[in-house]
Image (tube, coloured by chain):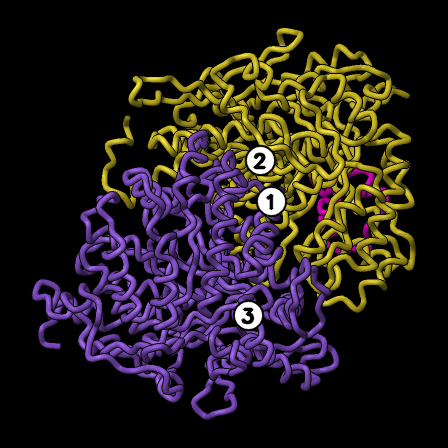
Chain colours: A purple, B yellow
Amino acid sequence: MSAIPSDFLQKTAKLSETVIAPFPASHKRYSVGSRPDLRVPYREISQTATQNDSGIVSNPPIPVYDTSGPYTDPDVEIDLLKGLSPLRQAWIEERGDTEQLDGPTSRFGQERLTDEKTENLRFSHIRPPRRAKAGANVTQMHYARQGIITPEMEYVAIRENNRLQEMRADPRYKALLRQHKGESFGASIPDEVTPEFVRDEIARGRAIIPANINHPEIEPMIIGRNFRTKINGNLGNSAVTSGIAEEVEKMVWGIRWGGDTIMDLSTGKHIHETREWILRNSPVPIGTVPLYQALEKVDGKAEDLTWEIYRDTLIEQAEQGVDYFTIHAGVRLAYVPMTAERVTGIVSRGGSIMAKWCLAHHEESFLYTHFNEICEIMKAYDVSFSLGDGLRPGCLADANDEAQFAELKTLGELTQIAWKHDVQVMIEGPGHVPLHMVKENMDKELEDCFEAPFYTLGPLVTDIAPAYDHITSGIGAANIGWYGTAMLCYVTPKEHLGLPNKDDVREGVITYKIAAHASDLAKGFPGAQVRDNALSKARFEFRWLDQYHLSLDPERAREYHDATLPKDAHQVA
Amino acid sequence: MSAIPSDFLQKTAKLSETVIAPFPASHKRYSVGSRPDLRVPYREISQTATQNDSGIVSNPPIPVYDTSGPYTDPDVEIDLLKGLSPLRQAWIEERGDTEQLDGPTSRFGQERLTDEKTENLRFSHIRPPRRAKAGANVTQMHYARQGIITPEMEYVAIRENNRLQEMRADPRYKALLRQHKGESFGASIPDEVTPEFVRDEIARGRAIIPANINHPEIEPMIIGRNFRTKINGNLGNSAVTSGIAEEVEKMVWGIRWGGDTIMDLSTGKHIHETREWILRNSPVPIGTVPLYQALEKVDGKAEDLTWEIYRDTLIEQAEQGVDYFTIHAGVRLAYVPMTAERVTGIVSRGGSIMAKWCLAHHEESFLYTHFNEICEIMKAYDVSFSLGDGLRPGCLADANDEAQFAELKTLGELTQIAWKHDVQVMIEGPGHVPLHMVKENMDKELEDCFEAPFYTLGPLVTDIAPAYDHITSGIGAANIGWYGTAMLCYVTPKEHLGLPNKDDVREGVITYKIAAHASDLAKGFPGAQVRDNALSKARFEFRWLDQYHLSLDPERAREYHDATLPKDAHQVA
């Protein structure tokens, strides 16, 4: 640890107060499952009482789904230098199908472990990686198909229910449980999420639990159409030392506001080291685009990419603990000419790298031709596929075109191959799509990709509002979430313009929490309306503090009210 | 003029630079109609050339619909003390069906004209009001039904087309005119808006041109399902002298970013004077809720309201030039008990005032019983009805309930009465509605109110995000606009929390421009995609400046880019 210069240490070891401050009037609670080490967190927001003519009537506390991890638990001591406690370690070991390796097996991982130039940036408690024993398959899908309910499955079942059964049994919640019947377009949302339902959905491929065996720190979560709509936040530095501290802080900030997973899209010379810091301190699944790092290894020359370099990168990242990989294996050589007449060509970075490679070599994409080998790697660590939409439209004009839908068909074909290996899969989607053409994307995905979870970026419903693309895309996201998309990838106000800072991350995450929650209400997810009802009642009764506390962003709600109105006696009622 | 204290004069006479600065790379242009005084403004955004392998190819200028009025025309000298030039004056006079009165005919208007206490706040060029000659009806609907195409109708036809015919005839625009076929849910959007089409839509009641004969300063605009989706911005001071200057500035600020109409919801002692300043300086139609002022006149006691006081207020405001009145005439005595079980009761201010009055007197609402007399006033000045939704839901739980839809039925009944008088009508809508229940609102409105234009607030699709309700409502607004709503009333980040400042107004207006434009694209309004296509092409070619200039908020787009990226050589290409 002494190799880390003290200024770097100081920066990295301590998060800002604002990032870890507990939420007002909130308590971190845990629902304990069938074993004592299965403790599912939620946040309980207490309410003040209602004062009316008939006296004082208390209002019950409201439980909310909590993505913020141990950072908001005052009983947990955070030490970024050590990383979070590996809560899944025992579950993974108990299964007896993995082995601890002596060290990284990727060439790059080995090199970086002893690299002198990056020694001062290195996380100091690197665990030797774990891998499936020879011939074993350690994916959640594999267990599910064998009828096994893992602790991870039970965990997400408890988490999805969010105390619904307890509230139903408690008369204080009766009025708050009032909810409109949703329109779910043929989804199969259960009235209560059971561990068996989770197992069945995973076995069918309709949901995934991204949970690499080398990322035991995560609090498991599930991505699927019949569960709560999730959101992903992207991070990405562009090198320099302070970048690491900054990215860890942004990760914690992103999950504080509600990010369910984080994608690390960093580029530059130290992405391997940055990733280790993020993984060891992240309670949410981490996704990456391994192609970005592979490209760094060939100095940015797409045509110099090889299967061997890419393969080594997959193993390197899998052994660090990345939970899902975006892999643009659907960009086939034959599809590239279909983009020639587009207004914005190929805008996906991964898509354009692979298109360039295919054209340079006049060959089919190595991601496509080596897909079975990729599956072999995925199942040895339980890394989930996020099959990338390399040909997604970059503007309204290009929406829903031949190239986009040709690739989608191929993603469906690859899904079936992955499922033969019992590897978990989700499918990435657009992009830029006018409002009335959004649903076609969902419908085609369900059909062509056999109900594998859909994971979309926006879509943006107009191109004319750079600096407000969290909003243009939030509109599309709420709609596609309603139609059945399982996870929404956030967009910040800086989209198309630059890299997001902390304010942008907060704005983007809150916008997407709104979209995801609007989707859940529209789909009719059980219990989704409780928080709305509680906040509305507080609003009607001028219980200002409760109104803030129940909102997605209590700090800003309070700040806006305080800024404009005279001190209100009701506020502290 | 000397009666105005000089400090007030300084504040009021000059708008901030930021409010009237011309947009970058933009020119104010006018399309001239069938007569020389019919000059329809638009903003033309110039583009830089594309540099590619085959050389330099120029990109044509893009015309955009312009709501900002003379404030962005460098050839017009603005003098707030005099007000804008009354461009419709000649059209109104030529019709020969109105007479100029000696002075205000309302008691309140007469009192305030000579009131000493407000002398220093008074606009100094008050025109004597104009009114229909005895027995005449001066509404645009009346003319339309007689087969007359007024200059106002021709004006809006040219404005709606936004140079589409010129672009179609010019080969430089061929690729930019590419557009997806929309889904308009049975609307009758024409391929080209003709003056005759406008006349026909107004005659049928499917569209309105809010244009009081006492507001000759407006640049006419149309509100209807078969035209571009419009947005309204609300202003509202709460007295004090500087409030007037501030509200005029906010009005100019609101239309700068795209407000199509402005509602003045001011309260307090000087609303009469504030309104005069706003009207004389507003190129967009102004709406009010006369009940708010009537209530001031009875010191806030709802039960003391009388038809006589309300009637005098209608005449007072009609003679000042208010273009549309929100009138909550659908809140009938029998409907009030239907709200008893609601989570948030009656949240509309107008609705709750009338409900209180009805209950206090055990009588039917005087707005309902005097509706024919109200129509007589409306048609003497051409004030349009905005039939208020006094029973709109204030939270998701109360959405689409019996009370809401009972009132909507009554609004339909009142629409038919107004149409017998040839008075123009639009219908106000909710509120707070989950995403999957939004469409029912539109469908019922079309059926119950016979396709009168729908004018909705949001709707907000979740209750849990105070401080972000521009976004929760922008999602609902984009959807309901797509389904057929003609005008969207904006919501700012301060909704439920406090009064909006200038930043909030900008954020709210831009969010609603996004929603309205997304609706137009989804409905398939001809030419709506040109700006998206041009911006996307600029983006793909790294023409950064063009990308900013074509965006809804060029300043912020540029600011965000400059803040985060190193100086880009492409930027000044």
- Residue under label 3: A550
| Circle 3 crowding by C-alpha within 10 Å: few under 14, some 14–19, many from 20 | many
Look at 62% across and 21% down and name the residue there.
B161
Instruction: Name the residue nearer the viewer: B514 or A59.
Output: B514
Give the distance between the C-alpha atoms of the residues marked 2 and 1, in whole angstroms.
Answer: 9 Å
Instruction: Name the residue nearer the viewer: B16 or A304.
Output: A304
Look at 72% across and 17% down and name the residue there.
B195
Same chain for mark 2 and mark 1? The answer is: yes
Dot 2 and dot 1 residues touching (CB under 8 Å): yes
Q: Element type at marker 1? A: loop
In the image, residue B565 sits, relative to residue B120, either above or below, namely below
- Residue under label 2: B259
Task: Write down the quadrant of residue A550 in the picture.
Answer: bottom right
The segment highlighted magenta reads B288-313
The overriding secondary structure of the stretch rendered in magenta is: helix
Residue B312: image location, x then y, percent? 80, 38
Instruction: Name the residue nearer the viewer: B267 or A81.
Output: A81
Task: Write down the quadrant of residue A184 in the picture.
Answer: bottom right
Image quarter hosting the C terminus of chain B = top left
Same chain for mark 3 and mark 2? The answer is: no
**Subunit of mark 1?**
B
Give the distance between the C-alpha atoms of the residues marked 3 and 2, in whole angstroms.
Answer: 32 Å
Residue B236: image location, x then y, percent? 60, 44
Kind of residue at disc 1: Tyr
Locate residue B193 relative to residue A389 in the image: left or right.
Answer: right
Image quarter hosting the N terminus of chain B = top right
Q: Earlier in the sequence, mark 2 or mark 1?
A: 2
Which label number is shown at residue B490?
1
Locate residue A520 relative to residue A265 in the image: left or right.
Answer: right
| Circle 1 crowding by C-alpha within 10 Å: few under 14, some 14–19, many from 20 | many
